[in-house]
Image: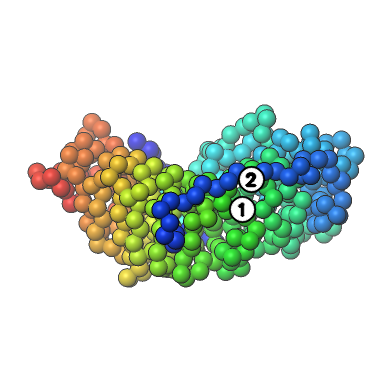
Amino acid sequence: MKKLFIKAAVVTLLFGTISGCKGAMPAQAAQTEAKYMEDVLIDEAHFPDENFRKNVENFLDVNKDGILSKAEREDVYYAEIGGVGYKDTWWYTDMKFSEHWYGYAPGISVTPDEGRVKSASKKTFSVSLTDFSTGRPAEVMDITGIEYLFNLEEILIRDYSIQKGSLKNNANLKKVWVKSSRYGAVSYEKIQQEIPLAQLSYFHMINIKIPSKGLNVSDMPNLEVLRIILPEGTNQTMKALDLSKHKALKDIELANITPASLDLRKNTKLTSVKVYTGKLKCEKKSRYYYYQPKKKVSCKIRFPKKNNIATLYYFVDNTSLDVRNLTKLEDLHTLKTTRIKAKSSWVRKTFNKKNWACVFVKNGIIQKKVKASKKKVTIL
């Protein structure tokens, strides 16, 4: 059983309509252009932003000859735009661990070293947002030249609102975590123009302005992780989110943006589902956080019959939730007003003194007494 230590911090912080073809075509593997693998001068022509260029000089140009050789950068697989500035050997198993409390979600709290891994062969390039001429934070950061990091697989961008430049020529990029410091400052259209979405298996967006009609995620057929985090109180809704073609999806999170319904019956590889909206609250005794949704902001979820869902957060204005297919749950968080329909056989097996195998929380209060009905279905 996963042990939860709940702590959240308020920080400023996806959806789709897939057109009706029978199956999403797999994205073709992009090829790195040969010119991006050659030695390159560290000059204004190749790295136009002075501060980005200084980061390249300081942390990648090992012999300080003003040339970024293939050997000096071929071990860079991870990048962090908005770090303290370095080249190092550690990274994250999941970029959500890059912030101690990465969003509003209850149940997310990590120690400083949790989720971090080291690799002797795969390095991280951390880019400082400091303006080297003033010592103050840079107002703009143009990352043009990042295409020369030809092995780049994952990137974490801490403030997309001040960023210029494209990642379209990073052919090996698979995972993107992107945040805007101000909600509304960055549109999803900008993301589409500058990030190679078709390549991605992991897409985590925080504070990115989403069209009210929702998103078409058919251009991301290989997604395994999709997270959209909007600020508390946004209460945004969308018409639909069609994920039926995303058979590889394992993790879906929608924070303060909800479709009226979410059909996950085709997503049999899911392990985590989080849908929450409204006002963040804290239960005084337990110190568990939860959400009180705005009235009529609802989302009906349909789960696959066979699945591996272990984590479910459900804080929307719905009075019922059917989890009869979720027999592998370890973490279940919802509201006391939500009537949960579960298999009685699962309840007996999961909630007993010898093996309490699921953390069950309503309105921030851990449920310590759970009794199965004599009927086939138990209402929790």
For marks 2 and 1, give the one nearer the viewer: 2
Q: Type of residue at label 2?
A: Ala
User: Is residue 116 at all visible to an observer of this figure?
Assistant: yes
Decide: few, some or many residues near mark 1? Use Cα within 10 Å; few <14, some 14-19, many ≥20.
many
Residue under label 2:
30
Q: Type of residue at label 1?
A: Pro
Residue under label 1:
196
2 and 1 marks in contact (CB < 8 Å): yes
Q: Could you say which is closer to the camera, residue 220 or residue 286?
A: 220
32 vs 222, left or right, is right
Q: Could you say which is closer to the camera, residue 356 or residue 147?
A: 147
Q: Position of residue 135 (x, y in %)?
A: 80, 56
Residue 374 position by quadrant: top left
Residue that lies at the very extreme toward the left in this rendered image? 374
Residue 134 position by quadrant: bottom right
Q: Residue at x 75, y 54 (%)?
A: 144
Instruction: Name above or below for residue 239 compared with residue 119.
Output: below
Instruction: Name above or below for residue 337 compared with residue 113.
Output: below
Q: Secondary structure at mark 1?
A: loop
Instruction: Name above or below for residue 46 compared with residue 86.
Output: below
Q: Residue at x 35, y 58 (%)?
A: 262
Q: Position of residue 45 (x, y in %)?
A: 85, 54
333 vs 354, left or right, is right
Decide: few, some or many residues near mark 2? Use Cα within 10 Å; few <14, some 14-19, many ≥20.
some
Q: Position of residue 367 (x, y in %)?
A: 26, 47
Q: Could you say which is closer to the camera, residue 185 or residue 44?
A: 44
The image quadrant where one finds the N terminus is top left
